[in-house]
Image (spheres, rainbow, N blue to C red):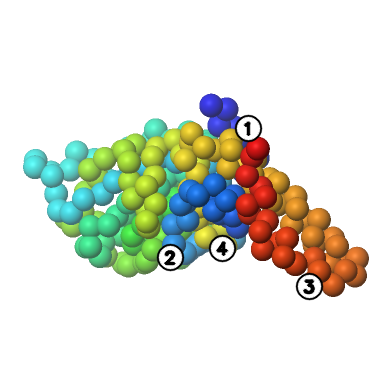
Amino acid sequence: MDYLSLIDRLNVLDACAVSDAMDSLGIEGVAEGLTRRSTNNKIVGRVQTMKLSAGLPPGGAKSHLGTQSVEQAAPTDVIVVEQRTGIMAACWGGVLATAAVEQSVRGVIVDGPVRDVDEFDDIGLTVFSRSVTPKTARGRIHQSGVNVAVEIGNVHVEPGDLVVADGTGVVFVPAGLAEEVISVAERIAARERLMTEFVKSGEPVTQVMGKDYESMLGTQKPE
């Protein structure tokens, strides 16, 4: 799979076009309820996952959670974290954010709490999360898996999937369907750009967004 090419194509799309494409293909990919905590940047990249569990493992944690993910990240990667333990403990903070930027990580998406949010803008790391808390992870949660399947919102996410996250939301694209989804999203985006031009040229919006618009998703499926 040519990840760089797919990421470049995905980078010119937004979450809405990708979500519409996945709707037209009957694929669930939108992880609801995640908020951008820092920068105004969009995140687009290849998913590297981390799964967290409650308490401490037998013998204690061998390394601080997140450090392994940062060190093995490639410049194409977005670190995606499942922290659904039910324990209010942050799994991402300022030191990890600094390390992630130094490693050229594209961004971090956490289904759970993060902390040190005020530092993220200065560090330059775009972070999405479900919540925030000052509570440390130490003694409360631990890293139980790296590059394993995770659940983010109601979406099953595998390492190597693609993700686009912007001010509207977070959408995951299964790796095996990425080419198809992106191709459909490109057609949807092109059509919406044309519709915008029609409106700017003076055509009534009721005509531009007529019955054909309501059925547009169905018309975008590949033949």
Compared with residue 120, is residue 77 higher up or lower down, i.e. above or below? above
Q: Is residue 204 left or right of residue 151?
A: right
Q: Secondary structure at mark 1?
A: helix
Which of discs 3 and 4 lies nearer the camera? The answer is 3
- Amino acid type of the residue that numbered disc 3 sits on in the rendered structure: Thr
Marks 1/2: CA–CA distance:
29 Å
Image quadrant assignment for residue 211: bottom right
**Residue bearing mark 1:** 5
Marks 3/1: CA–CA distance:
37 Å
Q: Which mark is residue 161?
A: none
Marks 3/4: CA–CA distance:
25 Å
N-terminal-most mark, 1 or 2 = 1
**Residue bearing mark 3:** 206
- Amino acid type of the residue that numbered disc 2 sits on in the rendered structure: Gly
N-terminal-most mark, 3 or 1 = 1
Q: Position of residue 199 (x, y in %)?
A: 84, 67
Q: Position of residue 166 (x, y in %)?
A: 57, 57
**Residue situated in front as seen by the camera: 163 or 182:** 182
Q: Position of residue 158 (x, y in %)?
A: 38, 40
- Amino acid type of the residue that numbered disc 4 sits on in the rendered structure: Thr
**Residue bearing mark 2:** 33
**Residue bearing mark 4:** 168
Q: Position of residue 14 (x, y in %)?
A: 63, 54
